Image: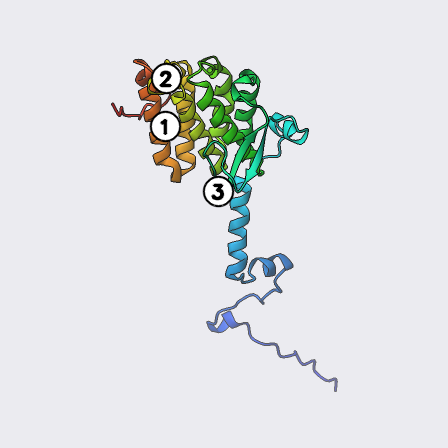
Amino acid sequence: MAALAVRPQTAEAPFASGGHWAAPALEPTALQRHRDKPRSRTAAHSNLLRRHRARTREPPKPPSSFKKAYDEGLLPLRVCYDRLQNGRSVNGRSIGWTVPDVLQLDYDHYALLFCEGLTETQEPLGFLAAEGLSELLSEGGPAHRCASLAQRLAPPLKHALRSPNQTVAKRALQAVVQYVTCDAREKGGLGVCGRALPIESIAPAVDACRRRHTSLRFDCADVLGTLERNGGPEALRRIKRGVLAYESVL
């Protein structure tokens, strides 16, 4: 008698008896393992710092005219340490001129050169540019040597005011105040530098500096007030043309 074929017993499907069937788990891929890998706080902090530096890093730029003149030894000044020059010393440093009288210099050339050097972040380039421009203006203002420089100094001043570097922006704010007050009547000048400066283009740059560097907001407000006080009777209208939210301080 032939043997009967026996059907092999198989496991009953879970859903046949009311159970829940789930697909077998798959091995995670390499990308999923990397994504789900727990990261330490140090790594997350490093990523934030890297992104912040990428946002605030200035794009590479060619050497400025000021740096070329410094490298070639063509600047009429040098850094002096541990002594006073004309009664001024900044952080133990001061500048010394290689000419007996600053008024003998070509203001059209050197004032623009120092103004372009305000954007330098390498030391002592930024220090030399800021202090050199300050002394040029303080000496040339009462001597009526600075009024004709307004249109030439405005573009580099606006560029420095919009810099992402806070130190550069602060130097530019100080330079704007020094220029508009260098020939004030109380200093023996005619008070024309503030009127000659294109306030309608400088004021928006000062406002952009305020929005970018919040720690300089009070300095920017003081600069706008100085522009209004020294810019003549039309100063308020010229400022409001670029900064609508400005309120008069007079």
Which residue ends up furthest to the bottom in the rendered image?
1
**Amino acid at pointer 1:** Val
x 36%, y 17%: residue:
188
Residue under numbered circle 1? 223
Farthest-out residue, front: 100
Q: Can residue 62 be seen in this view?
A: no
The residue beneath circle 2 is 188
Dot 2 falls on a residue whose secondary structure is loop
Nearer to us in this view, 136 or 127 = 136
Q: How far apart are marks 3 and 2 (CA)?
A: 30 Å
Q: Residue at x 32, y 13 (%)?
A: 234
Q: Can residue 174 be seen in this view?
A: yes
Q: Residue at x 45, y 27 (%)?
A: 175
- Report the Cα–Cα distance between label 1 and label 2: 22 Å
Residue to which mark 3 is pinned? 91
Q: Earlier in the sequence, mark 3 or mark 2?
A: 3
